[in-house]
Every structure is written in C-alpha cells, then in structure tokens.
Amino acid sequence: MVQDYLQSRKVQSVIVVTMSATIAIVYSPILYNDFLNNWDDQWMVTGNPYLNELNWSGIYSIFVEHYQGQYSPINTIAYLVTKELAGMKPFGFHLLSLIIHILNFLLVGVFIEKLLPLIKGVVLEKQACYWVAWGTSFLFALHPMQVEAVAWISASKVLLYSFFYLAGLLAYLYYLETEKERYYLATLVLFLCSLLSKEQAIVFFLSLLAIDLATRTTVKNKKLWLEKMPFVVSAIVFGCFTIWVQKIYSSGPLGMDALYPLYQRVVFANYSFWEYIIKLLTPHSLSHIYFFPMDGGESLPLRLWFYPVATAVFIWLLIEYRRYINRVHVFGGLFFFINIALVLHVIPISRRWVIADRYIYLSSIGFFLIGTYTLIPRLLNDSRSKAKKSIIIVAVSVYLIILCGYTHQRTKVWENMQTLNQDVKQTLEKHLSESSYLENRLIKE
C-alpha cells in the first residue's frame, strides 16, 4: 500500500519539491554572507572592470578578451546581469548561486531517472529508478563538500559549467532515444556554453562516451565516433587556449604542480583520489585550503606511498570481482574519474592546493550513483525483513541529518574573511604538528 502510494507521480513530485526546499533551507545562511575580498572576490566581482555596464560593447569585450588568466565569458555575463538587477551587493550573487545549485539538483535527478532505463543489462522498476535518481541527486546537493562551490561567489563557475554540462548530457539522452538532429545540436550548444563557463568542461565528450558504453550494445560504430568529433575538436582548441591564457599570467602549467617531478605528482594523484573518496564517505575536517604534503624539492613523506598501494589493491579487487559489476557501476565510476581526472596533478596545471572541495562538485554524482544503486533496490526488495529495512532507513536518515547539519554549519564558515581564516587556523592547529610549517603556510587575514 505504501509503495503504491509512493509510486504516484504527484506524490513523487511533492517529494522532489520537499527535497528542493530542504536544500534551500540548509544553504540559506549563504544569502547573508559577505564578499570575500581577500579571496578572489575582489577581482572576480567587486573590482572586475567588465561589470561596469550592461551593453553590447561590454558583452563583446567579455567574449573577445581574457581577464587575470581566466576566460569564462558566460560566468562574467551572469555576474554582470546579477549586478544590474540586484546591485553590487553580495545577496544577489549568493541568491544566484543557490538557484543554480537547486537547478543542478533537479537536472541530476531527471538525468539519472532517464538514464537508468536505457542502461543495457540492467532492469529496474520505475520506483527503484526514481529513488536511485533522486537519492543520488539529494546526496549530491546536500553534501558538505559542495558548500565551497555554492557559498563562495568566485566559485560560481563550477555551478554554471555544471548546469550546462548536465543539461547537455540530458539532451544527449533524448538524442539517443529519438535520433533527432535537434537534440544533437542542443547537446553541442550546451557543451559550448559549459566550456565558456569553465575550462573543466573539456572532458564532456568522455562523459558522452561513458553514456554510450552504458546504453549501447556496442561502441564499434563509425557514426558514434564521428558524432563526437565536434566535441573533441572544441575541447582540444579550448584546452590549448586555456593553457596559453594561463601561461601569460604565469598561473598555468608553471604553477605549484610544476615544482614536483612526475613520480611525485603520480603519488599526489593517488593521494587526492583517496582523499576525495574518504571525504565523500565521511566528510570531516573540511577546509577551504589543503596544503601539499611537502614543499617542492623535498622527499615524499613515507605515509603517502600507502595511497598508490591502495589504488593497486582497489584495481585488483575490481578485476577479481568484475562479475558483480554491471554497467551502472561502470558508468558511475567512469563519470567520477572523468570529471576529477584534470585536478589529480598528473598534468601540471594551475593548482595551489593538493585537493579542493569544489573540484568534487560534478564528479561526486558518479560516486553517489554507485552508492544509491547498491542500497536502494535492496531496500525495496520485498523479501527483506521489515526489521532490516527499518534499521537501514534509520541509518540513512541519521546520515542525511548529519550531512544537513554539517553543510548548514559549513555555510557559516564562508560568512566573511574573518570566519574563513578562523576555520583554516583551527584545521591547521588540529592536524599539523610542525609549527614552522604552520607559520610559513598559514594564510594571514
């Protein structure tokens, strides 16, 4: 009876609205946060010369010029429109970020709910598809690691590129279903909008291939690969342009990563990968800065060699138990890795910190998809005892409440520079034992 009631589309819509309202309430403190004028907002927003006036000449300049090693014209236009509508006050910019985050929550749910029935070799009832999709989306939206992207105005590029990225993936699913050219063109246009919001969108074509692997019987199809060429060419051109722009401002491939040899960057990649996984599972000691474990030229701390070993064991386990892995797991894993790969330090690019919460924003979807797909169908299985189901439901409820509380608390960390610096001081004092390292690295207010 309860399951039949929950299968009602009207009830499901009410649940989604309730989730959206919960997200808005949890993140509501950001609406009263200030600009962080010692943490990029001073040049990204308040001192940005391209935000002076909304006119065609200004919009043209935004698209044909780069600024401070950045080229994200659509994000700049979003700032400009916000400033014209709400003035140069933080409330309008924070409201924009919150709205885009909620829209991304909706896009994730719709995308996964549409994707799951298309995946080959996987049969899920509609109710299971709904709960897997919106469970994934709810975790994505509520996780404390997402606070940085939502609460920090200068990180709005992450939200905006993700919005167009997810909309493009959804358009591609419609193209796979109908083979109508307009959906293919919509996918391409949305991808370009994502690129013009943030350079990390260059991996979009790999996400399309991940969808193909999950939904098609075979990828040995000439048309399939030819369809990807406009995306690949655009990604290469934009990637080269981004490297050129960042080199001009000495913030690109000559940044922090270039101080470390390749073998150390490979170890950092393993370290970063597992740190993201651990913090997604059990978010703790979150910060807006995560220093490299040592300075350039120093030897690697012995503890870091544990991470490549953990990766090797993990790969062995995947191979050993591959018979238990289906295409949902494969898509989730690929989506996670594809969208985190650029910030894992193997390629030396402009990264000041070894990890950053905002880098996990989009890729976390793949991680949460694997988790919800593993749990929810088993929870809906009628053969399970009510006692076991009750225990699982209580455990999940407690976990969600903890996430909501921690996320709500993290939004207040981003209130102003004083609260932000206080947070990092507490983190460093708790986890760094070498006072000289602390003294040299600590960001001063």
Image (tube, grey):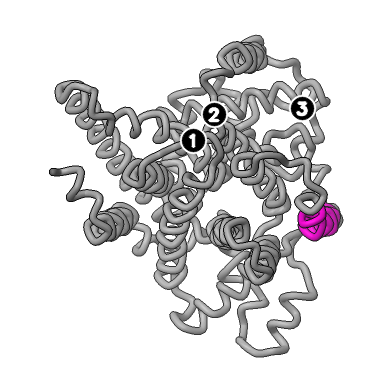
Residue on which disc 2 sits: 326
Q: Residue at x 70, y 39 (%)?
A: 218
Alpha carbon of mark 2 to alpha carbon of mark 3: how far?
A: 42 Å
Tag 1: amino acid = Val
Instruction: State yes or no: discs 1 and 2 in contact (Cβ < 8 Å).
Output: yes
Residue on which disc 1 sits: 122
Q: State the image coordinates of residue 412 (x, y, percent, origin top left).
A: 35, 50
Categorize mark 1 by other alpha carbons within 10 Å: few (<14), some (14-19), many (20+). Answer: few
Q: Residue at x 63, y 71 (%)?
A: 76
Q: Residue at x 46, y 63 (%)?
A: 100
Instruction: State yes or no: discs 3 and 1 in contact (Cβ < 8 Å).
Output: no
Residue on which disc 3 sits: 296
Alpha carbon of mark 1 to alpha carbon of mark 2: how far?
A: 7 Å
Q: Tell me the element at label 3.
A: loop
Q: Say which of marks 3 and 1 sits in front.
A: 1
Tag 2: amino acid = Asn
Q: Is residue 405 magenta?
A: no
Q: State the image coordinates of residue 180 (x, y, percent, origin top left).
A: 64, 67
Tag 3: amino acid = Gly
Q: Say which of marks 2 and 3 sits in front.
A: 2
Q: Tell me the element at label 1.
A: loop
